[in-house]
Image: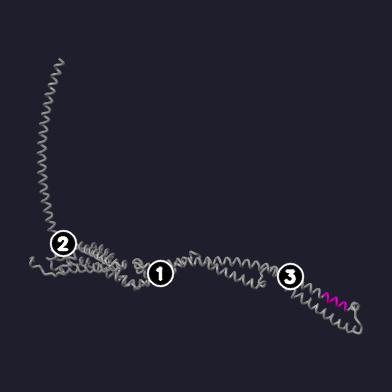
């Protein structure tokens, strides 16, 4: 095909050829590959466009007030992805003379690079798609972290043990207060109990019998006294008259004895009760002292618990404010990456795979496309260039060889001339030295003669 018979191509194709990094001068001669290289350029353009969009989104995540800076970052990121994709595609050169072309040595390193690029390109898109889920998960994590922080602080300040101690002291003080209010009824002293048992035994066993004897003696005496008084009513009775009646005297003696026995037993009971009261009062005093100590210990422990709780609240509130302020890109990324939601994870990885396909597609198309006119044309140009370079190198080597030969000949001739001159000079010097020596030798010989 002559130059003036080149197949027509559109400006859009030409632009995509440039994007694809194709050799335009060679591609113009290969009309069968026009669309192929245009498609490769289109895929590189789409990949760069996506990269720029993702870069813009990521920039807006970090910096919300600097629009120019965000746009600049997006353009730089897009240009970086464009350069990498274009370099990956252009670095693949097919040799038409090789029938067994292996894809893996070219595909594997480019696939690994595509995974890395797709991963960074998918992150900003994920943050847009899952914005609400990320926000919800971050709030939940913040609440859990806050509660965990409170629990850790409670363990560190030993709140549980102090609280149990407060509860124990409160129960003990309540028990002591109840014992003090009920008085001697709850006195646990063994001696007091023995005295109370003695008093109860006397009241139950001895005192009723003595009281009964006293009542009987009083009754007998009073009954006989009434009879004796009626008998003596006709005459005036004197105290001496009472003594004259032996029965009345005997009843009076029995009455007094019963009253004395009963009174002595009451006195014994009173003495035992006095001892018991003394022991009970001593116990009550000791109980009040013990309660005062318990109250003091309870107040100290309660004050410690309140102070520790205030410190925990202050630290936990500060920690809560800190974790709530952590809304940056790294926190959002970690939250999304570790989110325990199967639906979110599946969709996130589908987005990654879609970007991976877009990223690797230009390289894959270049590798899977069979050898065409463009590959043969490039092979021909490279061979021609190689042959021309070899011819030029050969000519240059011949020229250099001639120059080197000429230089060598000239140096040899020059060296010969120099050697000849040096020989003549040395010969002349030797003759002069011999003449001079001869003169000196003659003079010396004459002196000796």
Query: Is 386 placed left or right of 267 in the picture?
Result: left
270 vs 137, nearest the viewer: 270
**Residue 97 image label:** 2
The coloring applied to the image is one colour
Q: Is residue 173 left or right of residue 231?
A: left
Residue 123 in sight here: no
- The boundaries of the magenta stretch are 248-257
Residue at image location 10% in from the left, 67% down from the top: 6
Going from N to C along the chain, the mark reached first, 1 or 2, is 2
The residue lying toward the viewer, choosing from 166 and 104, is 166
Residue 430 is situated, as x and y percent measured from the top left of the image, at 12, 27
Residue marked by disc 1: 142
Count of residue discs: 3
Q: Quick one: label 3, few (<14), some, or many (20+) residues within 10 Å? A: some
Mark 1 surroundings: few (<14), some (14-19) or many (≥20) residues within 10 A: some
Circles 1 and 2 in contact, beta carbons < 8 Å: no
Does residue 393 sit above or below 377 in this rendering?
above
Q: Determine if the magenta segment contains residue 430.
A: no
């Amino acid at each position: 095909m002559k130059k003036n018979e080149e197949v027509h191509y559109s400006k859009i194709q030409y632009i995509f050829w440039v994007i694809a990094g194709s050799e335009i001068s060679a591609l113009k001669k290969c009309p069968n590959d026009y669309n192929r290289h245009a498609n490769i350029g289109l895929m590189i353009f789409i990949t760069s466009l996506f990269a720029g969009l993702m870069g813009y989104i990521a920039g807006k995540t970090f910096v919300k007030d600097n629009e120019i800076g965000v746009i600049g970052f997006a353009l730089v990121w897009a240009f970086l992805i464009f350069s990498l994709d274009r370099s990956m595609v252009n670095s693949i050169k097919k040799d038409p003379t090789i029938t067994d072309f292996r894809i893996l040595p070219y595909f594997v390193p480019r696939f690994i690079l595509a995974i890395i690029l797709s991963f960074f390109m998918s992150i900003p898109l994920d943050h847009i798609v899952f914005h609400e889920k990320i926000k919800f998960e971050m709030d939940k994590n913040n609440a859990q972290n806050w509660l965990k922080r409170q629990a850790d602080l409670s363990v560190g300040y030993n709140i549980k043990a102090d609280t149990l101690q407060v509860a124990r002291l409160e129960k003990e003080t309540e028990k002591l207060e109840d014992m003090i209010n009920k008085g001697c009824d709850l006195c646990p002293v063994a001696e007091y109990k023995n005295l109370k048992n003695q008093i109860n035994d006397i009241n139950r066993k001895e005192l009723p019998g003595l009281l009964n004897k006293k009542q009987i003696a009083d009754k007998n005496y009073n009954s006989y006294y009434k009879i004796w008084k009626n008998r003596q009513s006709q005459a005036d009775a004197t105290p001496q008259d009472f003594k004259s009646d032996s029965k009345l005297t005997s009843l009076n003696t029995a009455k007094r004895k019963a009253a004395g026995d009963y009174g002595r037993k009451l006195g014994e009971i009173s003495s035992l009760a006095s001892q018991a009261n003394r022991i009970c009062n001593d116990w009550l005093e000791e109980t009040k002292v013990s309660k005062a100590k318990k109250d003091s210990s309870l107040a100290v422990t309660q004050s410690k618990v309140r102070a520790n709780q205030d410190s925990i609240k202050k630290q936990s509130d500060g920690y809560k404010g800190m974790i709530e302020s952590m809304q940056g890109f790294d926190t959002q990324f970690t939250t999304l990456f570790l989110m325990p939601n199967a639906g979110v994870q599946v969709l996130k990885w589908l987005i990654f795979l879609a970007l991976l396909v877009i990223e690797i597609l230009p390289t894959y198309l270049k590798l899977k496309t069979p050898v065409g006119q463009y590959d043969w044309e490039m092979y021909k140009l490279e061979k021609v260039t190689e042959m021309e370079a070899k011819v030029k190198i050969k000519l240059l080597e011949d020229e250099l060889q001639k120059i080197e030969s000429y230089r060598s000949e000239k140096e040899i001739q020059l060296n010969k001339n120099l050697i000849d001159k040096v020989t003549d000079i040395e010969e002349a010097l030797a003759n002069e030295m011999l003449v001079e020596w001869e003169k000196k030798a003659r003079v010396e010989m004459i002196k000796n003669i």
